[in-house]
Amino acid sequence: MHECKTVTLRTRPLKNRMLSFYLDYYPGYRDKETMKVIRHESLGIYVYDNPRNKREQNFNEVMTEKAEAIRCRRFESVVNERYDFFDKYKLKADFLEYYRKQLRKHDQKWEFVYLHFRNFVHGKCTFEEIDIDLCNKFREYLLSAKKLRRNGPITRNSASGYWSTFRGFLKNLYRNGMIKTNVNDFLDKIETEDVVKEYLSVEELYKLAETPCKKPILKIASLFSCMTSLRISDILALCWEDIVDYSAGGKCVHIITQKNKAEDIIPIS
């Protein structure tokens, strides 16, 4: 891992006769998250290039002293191997881009949460903007948000699931040092609502089996779902390896459900 050995104060020319101070770190500091080596830090301090009068000379002296004071503090931190001042680069980084890259590691719910958050912040958000106030406003947004691919608002239970997923993401960010405050500890969950679920009666199931269908595979899939209680996401992910011997005899479906990531064992005929 690269570690800084020297900190040098330098300038780069700008328009309108001005110079901009920046620090040059050698050989640099490698960010553990992005693995990029940081070499330069802009100080936001400017001086006149070739001052024309006493006022401009005095201004340059004051600004140069400020820049040098920062260089000394940075060098002291480097000597003591404290590199937390580089964290501001992380705070300025694109939160949405980081979030998007995490999607491939997770299920579709993560994508839905990401898309809702992107809509909420209108496509722009940095790490330094992730605070309690912003997250609570996102919570309010979820409670009245529209579905992404269909008409109508999302249900309260869906909002609760999305919010729980987002809070879990915040917890991981804090654990990995991407944000400085464990925002998740200050956020209230969204309570779920009891839902009355409708089930087919035995008579209705027989009627379904006897009803013609123009797409036989659709009918077979529907009956399979009824007989096994599997969701469509679990049926689509089903493999022959998931059909195993049942301890009580016969066969069973042994899977980890796509939605809840819970173990499910279903005896089958």
Image (cartoon, rainbow, N blue to C red):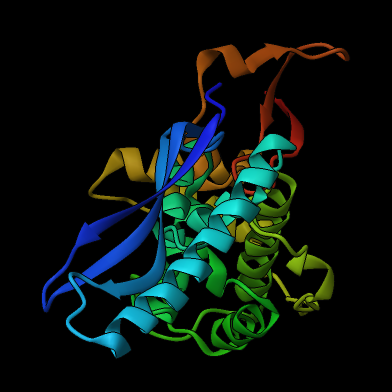
Residue nearest the viewer, comparing 147 with 169: 169
Q: Residue at x 78, y 63 (%)?
A: 182
The spot of residue 103 in percent (x, y) is: 46, 46
Viewer-proximal residue among 257 and 70: 70
| Corner quadrant of residue 83 | top right
Q: Residue furthest front?
A: 54
The answer to whether one can see residue 260 in this image is yes
In the image, residue 163 above or below residue 268: below
Q: In percent of the image, x 40 and y 40: which residue is there?
A: 39
Q: Decide which of 181, 37 is in the foreground and name it.
A: 37
Residue sitting farthest toward the right: 248
Quadrant location of the N terminus?
Answer: top right
Instruction: Count the labels in the image.
Output: 0
The answer to which of 18 and 216 lies nearer the viewer is 18
Query: What residue is shown at x 62% (from left), y 63% (from top)?
Result: 166
- Answer yes or no: is residue 223 visible: no
User: Is residue 268 rendered to the left or right of residue 236?
Assistant: right
Q: In this view, does 202 lie above or below 115?
A: above
Q: Where is residue 20 in the image (x, y as percent from the top left)?
A: 29, 65
- Coordinates of residue 68 in the picture (x, y in percent): 51, 59
Determine which quarter of the picture holds residue 149.
Answer: bottom left
Q: In the displayed structure, does residue 11 sit left or right of residue 41? A: left
- Looking at the rendered image, the quarter that the C terminus falls into is top right
